[in-house]
């Protein structure tokens, strides 16, 4: 069952319960996290509330991503770059006790994110129909440095994949994925400079707020690209998060419009992530192979906090069926798919 949310409301009622559950094409819900209620000792609840803003861009040669996150007892700021031809990848992370220096806006439709500790500066600026990403990290990669300044353009009427699902005992998540955003600007790492041109480069945003179960597992798969006929294409698939009796996180975009999918089976070998992944929907609307060419591994182990991500970059090929029955065929579209296990 795919329960679509179409009317505005608060996210949580006075008892900290979700007012609406399901998926939406736009972020209709006001993220009133001040109403969370899942601990008997309420002053400690802020230590378990998770918030993040993640931006990325695919160019023909490079993938770039920057994230500012606050997971209650820790802040997490990280940037990574992948060169598709050489398979070179580098990532650096700042961990900030109690999230010092991180401020994130209440909703995905308002406010800016600015982190600046004197050594690293990251800005996510919200404009009229735009999202601007600015990064300056001179010490990144042993002083080679990374910097970026690009704008993601949000076409009028562009739809999002918004999901609001419960876990248990007052826990929940509220996420918004924006794909298919033409990007313009530049990226520089070391001596390499990459022109980000809107006719070739496409970006996206992953915005998340909520209270996860302490032990969590999920899969996430995504891409944004141009189809051979010039239309924008995006993909978002997920598993393992929340009560999917209300909705799933599965769908794809064609020229900014979401085509919602129900269940999707994700098959891969957790002993060898480099083997081909398979994505199949039982209703026949999606059948994709994903062939990895590079693995990104990110691990954190701080006793009560642990996280292990295997994010695979590779190429998607296969077919999808749109809402009107059109068959969309893709071949060798670069994207990613991941497994994430966490105690947080």
Image (tube, rainbow, N blue to C red):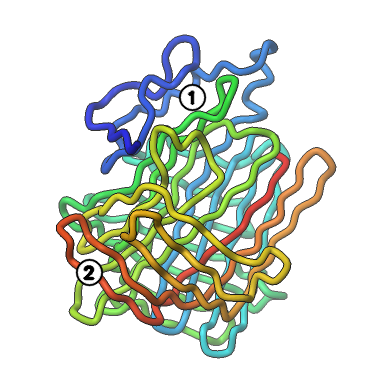
Q: Local crowd at mark 1 within 10 Å, few (<14), some, or many (≥20)?
A: some
In this view, 164 is above or below 184:
above
Q: Quadrant of the C terminus?
A: top right
Query: Percent x, y for residue 240?
Result: 56, 45
Label 2's element?
strand
Q: Nearer the viewer, residue 10 or 43?
A: 10
Q: Quadrant of the N terminus?
A: top left
Disc on the earlier residue, 1 or 2:
1
Q: Nearer the viewer, residue 147 or 78?
A: 78
Residue that protrudes farthest toward the right in the picture: 303
- Residue shown at 39% from the left, 38% from the top: 247
The residue indicated by pointer 2 is: 327
The residue indicated by pointer 1 is: 33
Residue 112 is left or right of residue 109, and the answer is right
Distance of label 1 from label 2 (alpha carbons): 41 Å
- Residue shown at 22% from the left, 60% from the top: 322
Q: Quadrant of residue 106?
A: top left
In this view, 200 is above or below 248:
below
Query: Which numbered disc covers residue 264?
Result: none
Q: Quadrant of residue 272?
A: bottom right
Q: How many marks?
A: 2
- Residue shown at 32% from the left, 40% from the top: 109
Residue that protrudes farthest toward the bottom in the picture: 86
Query: Percent x, y for residue 134?
Result: 44, 61
Query: Percent x, y for residue 295?
Result: 63, 73
- Residue shown at 50% from the left, 63% from the top: 135
């Amino acid at each position: 069952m795919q329960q679509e949310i179409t009317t505005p409301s608060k996210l949580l009622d006075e008892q900290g319960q979700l007012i609406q559950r399901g998926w939406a094409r736009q972020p209709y819900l006001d993220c009133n996290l001040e109403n969370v209620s899942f601990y008997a000792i309420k002053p400690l609840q802020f230590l378990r509330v998770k918030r993040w803003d993640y931006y990325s861009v695919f160019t023909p040669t490079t993938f770039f991503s920057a994230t500012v996150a606050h997971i209650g007892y820790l802040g997490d700021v990280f940037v990574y770059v992948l060169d598709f031809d050489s398979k070179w990848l580098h990532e650096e992370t700042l961990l900030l006790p109690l999230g010092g220096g991180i401020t994130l806006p209440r909703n995905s439709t308002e406010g800016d994110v600015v982190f600046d500790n004197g050594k690293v500066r990251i800005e996510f600026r919200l404009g009229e129909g735009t999202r601007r990403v600015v990064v300056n990290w001179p010490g990144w990669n042993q002083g080679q440095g990374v910097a970026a300044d690009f704008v993601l353009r949000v076409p009028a009427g562009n739809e999002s994949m918004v999901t609001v699902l419960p876990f248990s005992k007052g826990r929940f998540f509220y996420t918004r994925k924006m794909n298919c955003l033409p990007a313009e600007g530049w990226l520089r790492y070391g001596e390499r400079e990459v022109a980000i041109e809107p006719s070739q480069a496409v970006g996206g945003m992953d915005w998340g707020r909520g209270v996860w179960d302490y032990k969590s597992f999920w899969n996430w798969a995504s891409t944004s690209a141009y189809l051979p006929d010039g239309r924008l294409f995006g993909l978002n698939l997920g598993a393992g998060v929340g009560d999917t009796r209300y909705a799933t996180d599965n769908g794809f975009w064609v020229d900014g419009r979401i085509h919602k999918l129900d269940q999707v089976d994700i098959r891969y070998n957790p002993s060898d992530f480099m083997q081909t992944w398979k994505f199949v929907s039982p209703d026949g609307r999606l059948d994709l192979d994903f062939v990895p060419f590079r693995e990104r591994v990110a691990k954190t182990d701080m006793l009560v906090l642990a996280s292990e991500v295997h994010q695979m970059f590779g190429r998607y090929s296969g077919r999808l069926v749109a809402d009107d029955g059109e068959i969309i065929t893709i071949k060798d579209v670069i994207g990613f798919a991941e497994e994430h296990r966490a105690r947080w």
